[in-house]
Image (cartoon, rainbow, N blue to C red):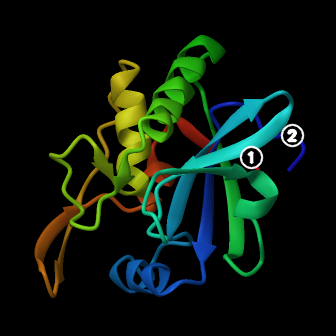
């Protein structure tokens, strides 16, 4: 993991109840969660949206994100966008963290201060002027029907290539 770069997408197959639910809904996919790498002072961090005790967008060190208690499988996907664009994408994701946006328990793509993991990635690219055209999948929850973007959508796009 020493070769990660600013703007890389990191995907993991999580061990939480939420991860299990995502896996059931997207059963052909390898991964249930996604974040984006931000390099600060040569230290890799992951910015991601996940339900936890305070529900704010998280920025944690890569090794903490990769903790075996949280992840059973991991991959890195790299884009073919230039470093200037990726710097802006990462800046957008970091802004969500700094503004203390919260995890979107309603999985509503129309809200802008509540984000779930794939929505954070999508909106970071969108706010940087890149439209990825990812597909949503309708799923039924106890709280209603939702059109959700699954982490696997990013692995299908030609802009992203698996490097680790």
Does label 1 or label 2 sit earlier along the sequence?
A: 2
The tag on residue 80 is none
Relative side of 108 to 163, left or right: left
Where is mark 1, residue-wise? Answer: 163
Residue 130 in view in this figure:
no
Circles 1, 2 touching at the beta carbon (< 8 Å):
yes
Q: Quadrant of residue 161?
A: top right
In front: 156, or 131? 131
Q: How crowded is mark 1: few (under 14 residues within 10 Å), some or many (20 or more)?
A: few
Badge 2 marks a residue whose secondary structure is loop
In front: 150, or 56? 56
Residue drawn at 49 percent across, 40 percent down: 97
Residue 156 in view in this figure:
yes
The alpha-carbon separation of the residues under discs 1 and 2 comes to 9 Å
Residue drawn at 55 percent across, 69 percent down: 31
Where is mark 2, residue-wise? Answer: 3
Q: Position of residue 65 (x, y in %)?
A: 70, 61
Q: Quadrant of residue 151?
A: bottom left
């Amino acid at each position: 993991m020493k070769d990660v770069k600013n703007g890389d997408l990191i995907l993991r197959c999580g061990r939480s109840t939420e991860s299990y639910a995502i896996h059931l809904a997207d059963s052909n996919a390898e991964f249930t969660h996604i974040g984006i790498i931000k390099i600060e002072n040569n230290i890799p961090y992951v910015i991601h949206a996940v339900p936890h005790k305070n529900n704010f967008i998280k920025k944690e060190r890569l090794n903490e994100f990769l903790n075996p208690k949280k992840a059973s499988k991991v991959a890195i996907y790299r884009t073919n966008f230039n470093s200037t664009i990726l710097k802006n994408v990462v800046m957008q994701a970091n802004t969500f963290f700094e503004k203390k946006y919260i995890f979107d328990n309603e999985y509503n793509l129309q809200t802008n201060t509540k984000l779930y993991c794939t929505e954070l990635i999508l909106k970071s690219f969108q706010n940087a002027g890149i439209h990825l055209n990812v597909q949503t999948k309708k799923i039924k929850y106890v709280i209603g029907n939702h059109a959700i973007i699954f982490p696997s959508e990013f692995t299908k796009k030609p802009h992203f290539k698996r490097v680790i």
